[in-house]
Image (spheres, helix red, strand yellow):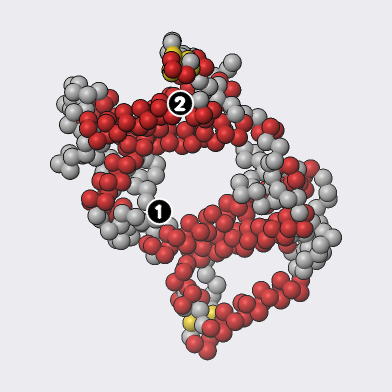
Amino acid sequence: WGDWANYTASPLRAFENELGVQAPIGFFDPFGMTKDGDMEAFKRRRATELKNGRVAMLATMGYIVPEYFRFPGFCSPSEGVKFADIPNGLAAISKVPAAGWTQWFLFLGLIEKGVYTYDPTRSPGDFKNAGVLGVPNGSTMVPGEGRNRKLNSELANGRLAMMAIIGMFFQDGLTGSAWGDWAQYTESPLRAFENELGVQAPVGYFDPMGMSKDGDLKTFRRRREAELKNGRVAMFATMGFILPEYFRFPGYLSPAKDIKFADVPNGLAALGKVPLTGWIQILIFCGMVDFGLYRADESRDPGDYENAGILGVPNASGPMSDVEGRKRKLNSELANGRLAMVAITGMLFQNGMFGTTGPAMWGFGS
């Protein structure tokens, strides 16, 4: 694939040697928010990331510890609320008295504004009064490789904890527990189509936005049809990026304009080389195939056409008689189509950024 060093406008340039730049991602800034090289804005965002990560690590532990240990006695003696009476997770929000929440906010504000105050002369998240693990006035680490490794670990663990606590909130809200049984989520979009083709390990039925939770079979079939069609086109397109590097048709693409197949570059550059009449022919051909040969039939499964045999060959043999074998192969088609959609998107992106199309793109050697 292309060398990212060629991407001279990359936001990597300004802060690629900062803490938190770790393998395998490196400096991750897909929106280019730091490409202006503004150090003050970077330090502010890094301080925010550290703070959110530290809170998330405490919150994640706060979900786990109460399952095994509770403080004895009362959380609120005046209201008769014991620590043992407070449920774990989101349900605790309504159980803790308002006075308790007020005390929490006051305590956090005291820590934030009184003990750990931001100092622009120090690194983000490095507070004068905080020692190792944030212990006030505790010992500090000696600068060097060991300190950098531990600070990188803190950033990585904080990022993981932010993902973990969001996942715990999500699962707790839907099932009643941070590690509850998803079967308790009776409104889950899993229910309607969890036995359909394409529901494969380890993700299962993947519908994070709940677009199919209404159980509308007609809409599901339309989306599955579109997924299959896009996946099949993407598989052809992915092969179409690779094959021309090793084989070209002989002769002319356009005799009238003296354009040979060998003259057409691979990848996105071909768009400007193929004549307009060629694109019209391609669109007409695709339309004939889509509307004439492979017509959707509501009495058949999505993507299953009356005139199409195995591998889509018109009027070829089919359907497959082995039920389990057929299901396995249809699942493979969906999985391969999904992979191809990701692959062709990556190829188009890399081709557009670096102009690479050949073996340098997919790593087979020159």
- From the viewer's perspective, tell me whether residue 276 is left or right of residue 306: right
Question: 155 or 197, which is in the foreground?
Answer: 197
Which one is in front in this view, the residue at disc 2 or the one at disc 1? Answer: 2
Question: 31 or 319, which is in the foreground?
Answer: 31
Instruction: Give the residue at mark 2.
Output: 275
| Image quadrant where residue 99 sits | bottom right
Three-letter residue code for mark 2 = Pro
Q: Position of residue 121 (x, y in %)?
A: 84, 60
- Residue drawn at the location 58% of the way across and 17% of the way down: 365
Q: Establish if 38 lies above or below 327.
A: below
- Residue drawn at the location 76% of the way across and 74% of the way down: 114
Helix, strand or loop for disc 2: loop
Q: Position of residue 204 (x, y in %)?
A: 35, 45
Three-letter residue code for mark 1 = Pro
- Where, quadrant-wise, is the C terminus in this rendering? top right
- Residue drawn at the location 43% of the way across and 10% of the way down: 250
- From the viewer's perspective, tell me whether residue 264 is left or right of residue 43: left
The residue furthest front is 256
Mark 2 residue crowding within 10 angstroms, few (<14) / some (14–19) / many (20+): some
Residue 23 visible somewhere in the drawing: yes
- Residue drawn at the location 77% of the way across and 66% of the way down: 118
Instruction: Give the residue at mark 1.
Output: 208
Dot placed on the residue nearer the N-terminal end, 2 or 1: 1
Q: CA distance from mark 2 to mark 1?
A: 43 Å
- Where, quadrant-wise, is the N terminus in this rendering? top right
- From the viewer's perspective, tell me whether residue 277 is left or right of residue 7: left
Q: Establish if 26 lies above or below 249.
A: below
Helix, strand or loop for disc 1: loop
| Image quadrant where residue 52 sits | bottom right
Number of numbered discs on residues:
2
Q: Establish if 222 lies above or below 287.
A: below
Q: Position of residue 293 (x, y in %)?
A: 22, 30
